[in-house]
Amino acid sequence: MPIAFAYVMMGLLILTSILLTLLVLLHRGKGGGMSSMFGGGVSSSLAGSSVAEKNLDRYTVLVGVVWFASIVGIGFWLKVTEATL
């Protein structure tokens, strides 16, 4: 397999790692703990999940799946490369 595949997978892994971290930090806290320490404990008058929160959940899951797939791709590339040596 070409080395370009490994570079693409590494770049994708770095990009999705940063995006996944940011998306997780954008989620609203569900209770006490660290989230309430930084102002996340303020309750709002809106009940239930908004469309924005549902979309944030979907984006987080999508980026998580791409992140996992890039890790599997790197592992596959390492396995194939090792077999050819």
Image (tube, rainbow, N blue to C red):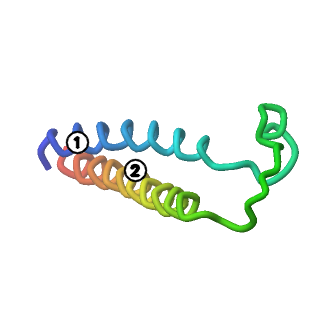
- Position of 18 compared to 8: left or right? right
Farthest residue to the left: give it. Answer: 2
Mark positioned earlier in the residue sequence (1 or 2): 1
Q: Secondary structure at mark 2?
A: helix
Q: Quadrant of residue 76 in the image?
A: bottom left
Left or right: 61 in relation to 43: left
The disc at residue 34 is none
Residue 66 x/y as whole percent: 38, 56
Tell me the SS state at disc 1. helix
Up/down of 7 relative to 64, above or below: above
Residue pointed to by mark 1: 8
Q: Amino acid at mark 2?
A: Ile
Q: Amino acid at mark 1?
A: Val
Q: Residue furthest right?
A: 32
How packed mark 1 is, by other alpha carbons closer than 10 Å (few <14, some 14-19, many 20 or more), is some
Q: Residue 64, image x and y in percent?
A: 47, 55
- The disc placed on residue 71 is 2
Residue drawn at 14 percent across, 40 percent down: 4
**Quadrant of the image occupied by residue 15:** top left
Picture residue at 73% right of the left edge, 60% below the top: 46
Residue sitting nearer the eye, 47 or 68: 47
Bin the neighbour count of mark 2 within 10 Å (Cα to Cα): few under 14, some 14-19, many 20 and up. some
- Furthest toward the bottom, the residue is 48
Picture residue at 42% right of the left edge, 51% below the top: 67
Q: Reply above or below: 30 against 35.
A: below
Q: Residue furthest front?
A: 45
Q: Nearer the viewer, residue 41 or 65?
A: 41
Q: CA distance from mark 1 to mark 2?
A: 11 Å
